[in-house]
Amino acid sequence: MLRYAARRVAAAVLVVFGVTLATFLLMHLEPGDPARAVLGIRATPSAVAALRRQWGLNSSLPAQLGHFLSQLVQGNLGQSYIYNVPVASLIGGRVGQTAALVAVATILAVTFTLPLSALAASRQNGVADHVVRALSVFGLALPAFWFGIVLIEIFAVHLHLLPVGGAGSGFGGRLEALVLPGLTASFAMAPILVRSLRVGMLEVMDAEFIAVARAKGLGGLRVLFGHVARNALVPTVTLLGLNVAYLIGSTVIVEQVFNLNGLGSLLLSSILNRDFPVVQATTLVLGGGVVLLNLATDLLAARLDPRIRLR
Amino acid sequence: MTAALGQDGPPFVRDGAPLVLAPLRRQRSVLVHRALRSPALIIGCAITLGLVLVAVLAPLISPYPPDHQDLYNILSRFSSKHLLGTDELGRDELSRLIWAARTDLQVGVLAVIFPFCFGTVIGTLAGYRGGWLDTVVMRAVDVLIAFPFYVLVIGLIFVVGTGTTGIYVAFAVVDWVVYARAVRSTTLVVRESDYVAAARTGGLPDWRILWRHVLPNTVTQAVVYLTNDVVLVIVAVVTLGYLGLGVQPPAPDWGTMISEGQEFLTTYWALATLPGVAVLVTGLGLSMLGDGLADVLRPR
């Protein structure tokens, strides 16, 4: 287990470095001059030059990269060009909202996915199976943000059951405000999960120990939950890990639809403001989050299924 | 899209090993026979063809030009004059939907051409050659997959600039990964097959083996991915339009229509809802086409 974990961690570190490098290059390949963008078109050349000097934009690209990396290692993400506060504090204030959204969406997605794929797999080529597969095709073609708008239309505008948007206040209010966004984000992911998990469960059902369990006279539900679902747990965990990047990416859009102040909306507004350090740091935090969650699910899967460690 | 991307493994995997789909050229009559008996494929083809026709014939069939304003009928409901009503600028909703099909289908299809070609070629080469090329390609794939798809695409559009050029560049950078990964794993299987060994023993040069024996077997898989990918890309184009980063107004685009309609959600539901239905129908058609195609081409 330790050797496997060490290998996975090493790979993750490498990917995080790649993500950092890619983010840095992305920001510095941008043709516009951030100093001029912040000061506006009426700024004097000397003011622009002074600001460029202050932000260290005059040194060479490798030197800037070195500076950026050394600051990053010390936990310093830089200073926002627009708000003039440390980027870390901006991100710190937002990360909770996004994390809560990801958590709620994951829980909802698993809650939908497990019973649906179990139902489809246990009735292969039956009516239920066809319905579930049709639903998953339907879900795949559904633009998540539009589905969110439709949910707002039904549950907030017409039924007045849930808030239209915003973060809400108090624990209950916050949770209430996360229901529709969480549903929207989970619906973006659920069809992919159902499709893969159904196939995973079908494979488990072909296994000999299932035939043995049935031969012993165990009932259908008992076999399904006691034997099949247990063994489908590992592929579920792996799948969740693989889809985390997609889920975190879709929070950017979901936050926009529901007017939530998370990392995604910070990213979008910083892009529109050309606030380079914030864009850079947010991208890095979101990318790093994906790598970390991937690592966590990999290790969890290896813990649940020892065979994985040997691969 | 990145993670949804590449998650379509299951239809092509048996016992953990990727299945090599039948080359398109082979067994034509068998494939045609199977195709005619696949309802998903036929329905998918019909929807897709219908949409392509609508997009191509937009100038002929749309009742009004997409930017024509009827200022006496702003936000009007369904009527004989405006079948699906008008938006806040008095533009005919049906005409905008039809012209948006033209924009979005075109952008969606153009955006996947480069990723499809580059990904297939680089995936085949990486799988066949192995060595440093394989290492470099797979590391690049790892890094690109680690990025949340929309975050990377939005970042790239930030660099290149909003609009269709931004979309094309962003997808060229991000989307080849799916094809490369899928095609590489198929190539690893094909590379070990007897006919490739025979071709190599026969002294054929590598490029000829790749072109005549490997690529025909890997490209089928990439084509199946292509139909699923176009769905994801069109949904992404619409999403970017919604965020104001994609197709720029006044060009008609489903995403922009949805974001403009969202303001009138409480007063007139159709403005935000109908463009979404259009995306949904497009996606359903292409998904069914893709699933049907995979089913027909799967070796059995």
Image (cartoon, coloured by chain):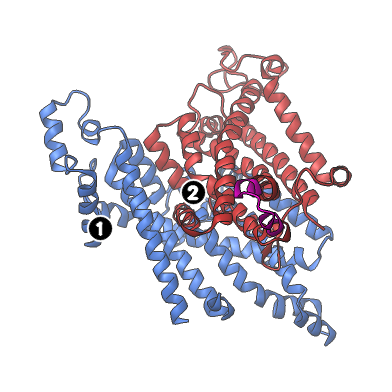
Chain colours: A blue, B red
- Inspect this view and state whether residue A186 appears: no
Residue B216 image offset from top left, x and y in percent: 70, 46
Asked if residue B207 is among those painted magenta in the image, a careful observer would answer yes
Residue picked out by circle 2: B149
Q: Is residue A115 above or below residue B3?
A: below
**Mark 2, chain letter?**
B
Residue depicted at 66% across the width and 60% down the height = B189
Image position, residue A308 (x, y; %): 56, 76
Which chain is mark 1 on? A
Would you identify the image quadrant in which residue B289 lies? top right
Given the image, on which type of amino acid does mark 2 rest?
A: Phe
Please give the residue where the numbered disc 1 appears in the rendered image: A72
Q: Residue furthest front?
A: B203
Q: Position of residue B160 (x, y in %)?
A: 40, 34
Examine the image and state in which quarter residue A210 appears.
Answer: bottom right
In the picture, measured across the screen, residue B33 lies left or right of residue A155, that is right
At 68% across and 22% down in the image, what residue appears? B56
From where the camera sits, is residue A269 visible? yes
Q: CA distance from mark 2 to mark 1?
A: 23 Å
Closer-to-camera residue (B183/A261): B183
Please determine whether, in this image, residue A63 is positioned above or below residue A306. above
Please name the amino acid that badge 1 sits on: Leu
Q: Which residues are magenta?
A: B196-210
- Is residue B156 depicted above or below A177 in this figure? above
> x and y percent of residue A101 in the render?
47, 57
Q: Which mark is residue A89?
A: none
Q: Nearer the viewer, residue B183 or A82?
A: B183
Mark 2 surroundings: few (<14), some (14-19) or many (≥20) residues within 10 A: many
Judged from the image, the secondary structure of the residue bearing numbered disc 1 is helix
Please tell me in which quadrant of the rendered image residue A55 appears.
top left
Neighbor class of circle 1 (other Cα within 10 Å; few <14, some 14-19, many 20+) is some
